[in-house]
Image: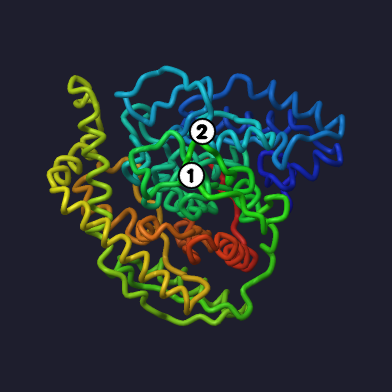
């Protein structure tokens, strides 16, 4: 059923209505703000709201009246995760140790959204410095899942996941260093794209810069591709970002997205150098997704990319980044840090430089193994999370074990290899909670990952959350 409430509409639907003058950006934003007022007091998706959002929506409305929209997203509400700079607002990173000084310039991904005309609704919550998957942080507390307030939204893009599921606008920026887009997307019934490393510029660099990237979190694959088109623009501030893609007409990543998967070779992968855990509902979701791709003409077979064990590789990358973060925090503020963050930093921070360089060599070995594997397969299909969203209020105990067991065992390998991966919702479990699978493609084949995600989405329609 096509929604009639503008807050429930996709970005593409809103833009079509704006163009026909059947809806204004101000009306759309007002509908979103009504939902924010109704549900955000318990969802807790926002670190800060933008008081100029209505003014910006009014400016967009004037442009549409004049027939002169400025970009692909003119007048569409969007949010920004509080790990990225939004000019005029502080970047607190979910931490009591950070300053409330406003940023003076936008991060590249944010600048791309603004230049495309998006209306920035506010900044969304994150786990402290993006270090973990449960959706809480010392600065803003617990962010709750709109599907069930007793469940977590996941992290670290906690607020983005919650805002997307609660229909606080259609477009949400997340970041992903080990699964921080894809995990909350899976827990919240959203599409979450972790693009190829370098596709979306990074600046300033975060704690996990070598494996992290920003990306879209949306309710539809086409909206993710549309949002990606605005974000994936070359920026001189990141000397390692990729040039704009000349083969994408107008820079629009929706081009070719409806091409389907007929004839594509898809590897159903159950090992990523180790055997990640997966519950019965997750197994059913994965098998169901494989059938959906086969029914659309894909050639699906179970295969093993024969990676080295990715757990100790990522553990060192993760641990060194957190140890450096703690070391650069003023001593008088270290007691304010999340206890689990400090625990991982202490456990991993004493490694030798040779150990860390050894981990980097193994990371490249994993990337090479995956590149060779993708010579045989166009796509990989895996689970996305071991379970559905777990309890929001449970304490974080033994975080290193939780990383491999409960949080990110299916996602972090693709950060190490830097290839694109998309979380796609494929249904609800017996408790009414979303379940998702993950589609990955070879490095820089973001187009194929989006195309396969769209094929799955067409075959497995998902309802919207009904917060209550």
Give the class, few, some or many, for how many residues have Cα within 10 Å of label 1's Cα (few <14, many ≥20): many
Closer-to-camera residue (147/182): 182
Asked if residue 73 shows in the view, the reply is yes
* Above or below: residue 416 compared with residue 38: below
Helix, strand, or loop for circle 1? strand
In this rendering, position of residue 324 left or right of residue 428: left
Closer-to-camera residue (284/369): 369
Disc 2, disc 1: CB below 8 Å? yes
* Above or below: residue 173 compared with residue 193: above
Instruction: Locate residue 191, reporting x and y percent.
Output: 54, 54
Disc on res. 107: 2
Closer-to-camera residue (370/450): 370
Badge nearest the viewer, 2 or 1? 2
Helix, strand, or loop for circle 2? loop
Q: Residue at x 52, y 25 (%)?
A: 105
Instruction: Locate residue 67, reporting x and y percent.
Output: 86, 34
Asked if residue 43 shows in the view, the reply is no
Give the class, few, some or many, for how many residues have Cα within 10 Å of label 2's Cα (few <14, many ≥20): many
Residue identifier under label 1? 214
In space, the residues marked 2 and 1 are separated at their CA atoms by 10 Å
Q: Residue at x 61, y 38 (%)?
A: 112
Quadrant of image for the N terminus: bottom right
Closer-to-camera residue (346/244): 244
The number of callouts visible is 2
Instruction: Locate residue 92, reporting x and y percent.
Output: 39, 26
> Of marks 2 and 1, which one's residue comes earlier in the chain?
2
């Amino acid at each position: 059923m096509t929604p009639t409430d503008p807050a429930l509409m996709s970005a593409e639907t809103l833009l079509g209505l704006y163009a026909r003058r059947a809806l204004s950006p101000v009306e759309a934003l007002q509908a979103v703000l009504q939902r924010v007022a109704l549900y955000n007091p318990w969802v807790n998706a926002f670190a800060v709201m933008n008081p100029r959002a209505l003014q910006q929506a009014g400016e967009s409305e004037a442009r549409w009246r004049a027939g002169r929209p400025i970009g692909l997203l003119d007048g569409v509400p969007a949010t920004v995760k509080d790990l990225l700079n939004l000019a005029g607002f502080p970047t607190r990173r979910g931490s009591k140790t950070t300053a409330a000084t406003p940023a003076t310039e936008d991060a590249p991904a944010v600048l791309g959204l603004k230049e495309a005309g998006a209306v920035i609704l506010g900044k969304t919550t994150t786990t402290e410095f993006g270090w973990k998957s449960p959706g809480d942080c010392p600065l803003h507390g617990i962010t709750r899942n709109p599907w069930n307030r007793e469940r977590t939204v996941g992290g670290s893009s906690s607020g983005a996941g919650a805002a997307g599921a609660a229909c606080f606008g259609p477009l949400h920026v997340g970041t992903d260093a080990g699964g921080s887009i894809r995990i909350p997307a899976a827990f919240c019934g959203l599409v979450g794209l972790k693009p190829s490393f370098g596709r979306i510029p990074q600046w300033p660099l975060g704690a996990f810069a070598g494996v992290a990237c920003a990306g879209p979190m949306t309710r539809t694959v086409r909206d993710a591709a549309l949002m990606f088109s605005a974000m994936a623009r070359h920026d001189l501030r990141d000397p390692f970002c990729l040039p704009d893609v000349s083969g994408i007409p107008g820079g629009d990543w929706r081009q070719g997205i409806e091409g389907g998967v007929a004839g594509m070779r898809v590897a159903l992968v159950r090992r990523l150098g180790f055997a990640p855990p997966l519950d019965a509902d997750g197994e059913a979701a994965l098998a169901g997704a494989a059938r959906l791709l086969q029914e659309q003409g894909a050639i699906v077979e179970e295969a093993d990319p024969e990676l080295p064990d990715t757990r100790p590789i990522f553990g060192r990358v993760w641990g060194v980044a957190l140890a450096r973060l703690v070391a650069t925090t003023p001593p008088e503020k270290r007691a304010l840090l999340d206890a689990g963050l400090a625990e991982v930093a202490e456990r991993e921070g004493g490694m030798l430089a040779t150990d860390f360089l050894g981990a980097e060599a193994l990371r490249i070995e994993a990337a090479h193994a995956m590149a060779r594997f993708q010579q045989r397969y166009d796509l990989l299909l895996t689970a996305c999370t071991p379970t559905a969203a777990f309890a929001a209020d449970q304490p974080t105990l033994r975080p290193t074990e939780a990383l491999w067991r409960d949080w990110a065992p299916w996602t972090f390998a693709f950060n190490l290899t830097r290839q694109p991966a998309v979380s796609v919702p494929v249904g609800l479990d017996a408790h009414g909670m979303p379940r998702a699978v993950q589609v990955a493609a070879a490095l820089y084949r973001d187009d194929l990952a989006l195309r396969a995600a769209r094929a799955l989405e067409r075959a497995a329609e998902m309802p919207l959350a009904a917060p209550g």
